[in-house]
Image (spheres, rainbow, N blue to C red):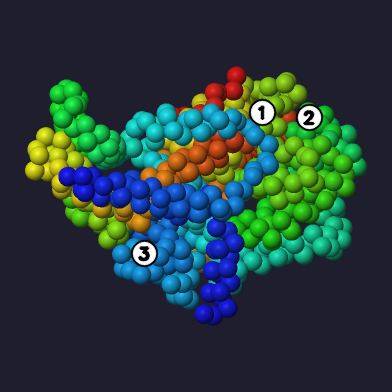
Amino acid sequence: MLIFQLLALAGLAAGLFGIYLRYAETKRRALPIDKSPVKGNIPHGIAYAFTTGMMPWAKESTRIHLIAYLRGIGFHIGIFAAIGTVILSPLRGFLPPLLSSTLFWVLILGALLGAAGGVMRLAEHNLRGLSLPDDHFAVWLTTLFIAVTGLGLVFEAFVVPMYIVSAVTFAYIPLGKIRHCLYFFFSRTFFGKFFGRRAVFPHPEPLK
Amino acid sequence: MTETIELALKTLEAQLNQPLETALEACARCGICAEACHYYRAEPKVEHIPAYRAEQLRNVYRYEHDFISRLFPVWTRAKKLDETTLANLTEIAFSQCTLCRRCTVNCPLGVDTPLMMRAIRAMATAGGTAPEILVMLADAAIEKGNDPSFYKEMFLEQIADMEKQLRDITGDENATIPVEKQGAKILYVPLAGAHTILPPAVVFNAAKEDWTLSIFEASNYGVFLADVNRAKQVAKRIVDEANRLGVEEIVISECGHAYSCYRWDVPNWFAGQFDFKVRSLIEVLAGYISDGKIKVDPTGIPGSVTYHDSCNLARNGGLLEEPRYVLKSIVRDFREMTPNKAEALCCGGGGGIVALAEYAERRIAAGKPKADQIKSTGARTVVAACENCRLQIGDLNEHYNLNIHVTALTDLVVQAMRLPKPLPGMEAEHLFEGEQVEAPR
């Protein structure tokens, strides 16, 4: 078992190192300093970008595609729960039963939502047209990761596959589409800075 | 590799800063941005999804910057830039994106697709594939800045004629249109044409403002080309003029891209040499009304009026409430479009496309969602505080039989000032006490 745990750990280390290299590469690039006078409030803009601006009702697109957006949110909750579960897995036998069963159902639900996303990418015309082989691979790999982690939490037979799939998933993070997890933070920060400076978000009060 | 491709790639590399790399890397291709784009709304197809358009640049970027993509291009559709690809990218960036940023606002990750479209425009301009007319217009403006004497005399003659009209309209024999007035507080920068000079002149005179008129026009075609060098040269004319006259403030005519350029870009291009406050004429109007510097009749505009948010002024400029404050001060029946403000639909006339005759059909087709939106308000007057938006909505009016009157905000304010005579072309709207309000449609 230890060897598989070490394998997962090696995958995690490789993934983190790869993400660090990506981070360093991006940070190495110039960051334009905006000298135009601020109209709004930049910190408020950034806070909006990461909080209320992410709410399903905040954007027309997420209001239109509410189910798809919530599916994505559920899938991503599943991913983070799976990462946490793998990290906690050496303590598997000591986890409180309520936590174990909650995690199990969160992971199973996350995997189902991931699979739904994978099917949508194949079935829906626009998504199929947009998707790269990398996208299909990433969504199914991540779905498998969540599913196997959930099953590994409950069934001994899935523990080794959990570590193997985890190792592959972690190592793949910086190599393909999954690395958008890093750029999410850059992107929302730039979004908040841009629209916060210009007093677009958060929405200004009407003039009286 | 040809020189064109070499220049285009060099330009991409030169632009590759943190925000651009983020935009190129962050997209998850969820496709949720589709309906945010007016091109997609008008004609729903994969090619009109903002993420798809951005992918065309990402394919090139991946080939240059991602080793997995270099090894297995099919895995990420990575593509080496060639003449055909550059032509395709150029077509996308100049004719299928108005840089409105509605997709960015609607993206869960906030991916800045217009930033990528600008990067393509810059590549195309450097490689010589950008629309020639935009290059010519930008170069003509630069030339004008180099030697304004050629047309200045004619311009001053026109202003003298306009001054007569101004006195006639206001009934004020002392009303003036000062040009190159040393030490004036405000330098007002119009667009080409009397329609952006006379109405503001009426307002400035009524407010007893210390102002002067710029001899240059505010529009900057270098911005549409995403060519910072050209854009800076065009802007420099006004920066130099403001410095020469010693003004405190630059006020930009009702123009989306010009406001965006002078308010948000020029302070970066001329850092250290640019200490002027920049405001849009819309902000000035709101200030005059709120301070009581101009008197307007709160029921001065009796008909139904709606307001179109120019993307450069509203979503990209933060002028969301000011125009509404002005309109609510003068309009009896103000009707909002849905959606509006930061979520407003682009009219399809931005990004310089109005100047590109070869894309007129595409532009009118992409304006259909805006036409529908206008129609559903039932308003008879559409106010647009941007020249390109007004031109586009005018064309939409004709094409989709909207039966509307398209006007600038300042023109309505002047109308609500109840002056002795109307502005030229506004005779029909020059309503007096007791005149009937239009019947509802």
Q: Do labels 1 and 3 share a chain?
A: yes
Residue sitting at 46 percent across and 72 percent down? B81
Horizontal arrangement in the rendering, residue A43 relative to residue B336 (left or right):
right
Tell me the tag on residue A52. Answer: none
Identity of the amino acid at label 1?
Ala
Q: Do labels 2 and 1 share a chain?
A: yes
SS of the residue under disc 1: helix
Determine if residue A126 is in view.
no
In the rendered image of this protein, does residue B207 appear above or below residue B392? above
> Between marks 1 and 3, how big is the CA–CA gap?
55 Å
Q: Mark 3 lies on which chain?
A: B
Observer-nearest of B271 and B160 = B271
Q: Where is residue A189 in the image (x, y as percent from the top left)?
A: 50, 39
Horizontal arrangement in the rendering, residue A50 relative to residue B134 (left or right):
left
Observer-nearest of A87 and B150 = A87
Q: Quadrant of residue A199?
A: top right
> Between marks 2 and 1, how big is the CA–CA gap?
14 Å
> Marks 2 and 3: which is nearer the front?
3
Residue on which disc 1 sits: B286
Residue sitting at 52 percent across and 42 percent down? A190
SS of the residue under disc 2: helix
Tell me the tag on residue B68. Answer: 3
Q: How crowded is mark 2: few (under 14 residues within 10 Å), some or many (20 or more)?
A: some
Horizontal arrangement in the rendering, residue B248 relative to residue A103 (left or right):
right
Identity of the amino acid at label 3?
Ile
Sequence order check: which comes first, mark 2 or mark 3? 3
